[in-house]
Image: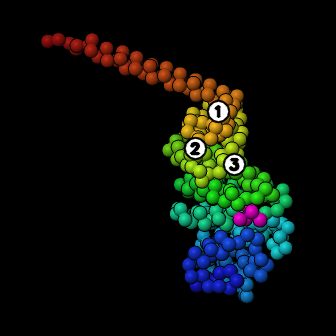
Amino acid sequence: MPVGLAGEKCLGSATLIDKVDKLRRPKPHYLAPIASLQNQSVFTFHDGNKYCKQPFHQAASLEWFVILAHFYLIAQSDVVIQDKSKRDAALESLRIYINRRTSFDELELLKLWKGLFFCMWMSDKPKPQQQLARDLAELVQSLQPQNVIPFLDAFWRTIAREWVGIDVFRMDKFLYLIRQYLAASFRFFAQRDWRNTDDLMEYLDVLTTTPLHPTDSKVPDGLRYHVMDIYVDELDRVDPERKGLMPIKNLLRPIKLLKKQSHTKAIRVRAQEVLSDERLADWQANDTYKEIQDGLQANGDQLNESANNDVDEEWGGIGD
């Protein structure tokens, strides 16, 4: 049976996760898991009393990576963990782990994001905070495609749940993390030329259900405002050349729902401002052009089919 924090035996995943839930800033006497991350066959950790080793496939459960994320990906100013190379190695190990997983259940991803959230919580100084936010956003690229939407859903749910507890001194770094994740999600679809319509619509449902929900009182208005503020900015960054592939009408659906259904006048006004952004005109023009071309093509196909039918009807064959 694996040994948990402060030498306690883990009776189940709840023991570890309860520890993570209660943590804010780790205390030195149990800040001790030290991983042998260069050799992926052996996992070495310290339980507060002694060093322990386990085969990697046994130790590398999701709960242990929550703990690793919580302890290794923290600020350079921490009195215990100051080695950036160890934090980078831990992040790389996390990338390898999530890349190998073919599926996650909902609770696993919420556990993981609990640890990653407090990893960001404890990050100090602007440059390490920004680098950590970018590194965490790059995890999207390490996931198997079928895990991306559930992973993003767990991210947004975690941010919405923890938003009210973020103090003014930590707010900026979480706003930057949100910007990085919105950009990473759009980039995921843009790299595939926006072809996977089903996954895109599922992700837009995630946005509509959590950060941009028009009526749910549990979603903070501050989160709604911030996502609206950066929405067009991040669309602009993934398609600066206006290639005409972006389904802008679908992408604006969550904003349109806010404008139509929100109970707060200020939210409706802000949504209208987003929809009136002059940068949207280029994509909308491309959409209109595509619709015209598709219409012309459809009409041409119908005319050709009609002409062929006419020829077939007129030709009666050689009579007897």
Q: Is the residue 105 above or below the residue 275 in the image? A: below
The quarter of the picture where residue 152 lies is bottom right
How crowded pointer 1 is (Cα within 10 Å; few <14, some 14-19, many 20+) is rated as some
Lower position in the chain sequence, tag 2 or tag 1: 2
The residue segment tinted magenta is: 118-122
- Amino acid marked by disc 3: Gly
Residue at the spot of label 3: 222
Residue at the spot of label 1: 272
Residue at the spot of label 2: 214
Real-space Cα distance between discs 2 and 3? 13 Å
The quarter of the picture where residue 76 lies is bottom right
- Amino acid marked by disc 1: Gln
The quarter of the picture where residue 227 lies is top right
Task: Give the left or right position of residue 11, taking residue 75 as reference.
Answer: left
Q: Residue at x 70, y 28 (%)?
A: 278
Q: Residue at x 70, y 72 (%)?
A: 23
How crowded pointer 3 is (Cα within 10 Å; few <14, some 14-19, many 20+) is rated as few
Residue 188 shows up from this direction: no
Q: Residue at x 60, y 66 (%)?
A: 111
Q: Is the residue 251 above or below the residue 298 in the image? A: below
Which image quarter is the N terminus in? bottom right
* Residue 121 colored in magenta in the image: yes
Q: Nearer the viewer, residue 219 or 101?
A: 219
As drawn, the residue found furthest toward the bottom would be 49
Question: Secondary structure under badge 3?
Answer: helix
Residue 272 shows up from this direction: yes
Which image quarter is the C terminus in? top left
Q: Is the residue 243 above or below the residue 176 in the image? A: above
Instruction: Check contact, mark 2 vs mark 1: CB within 8 A.
Output: no
| Colour mapping | rainbow
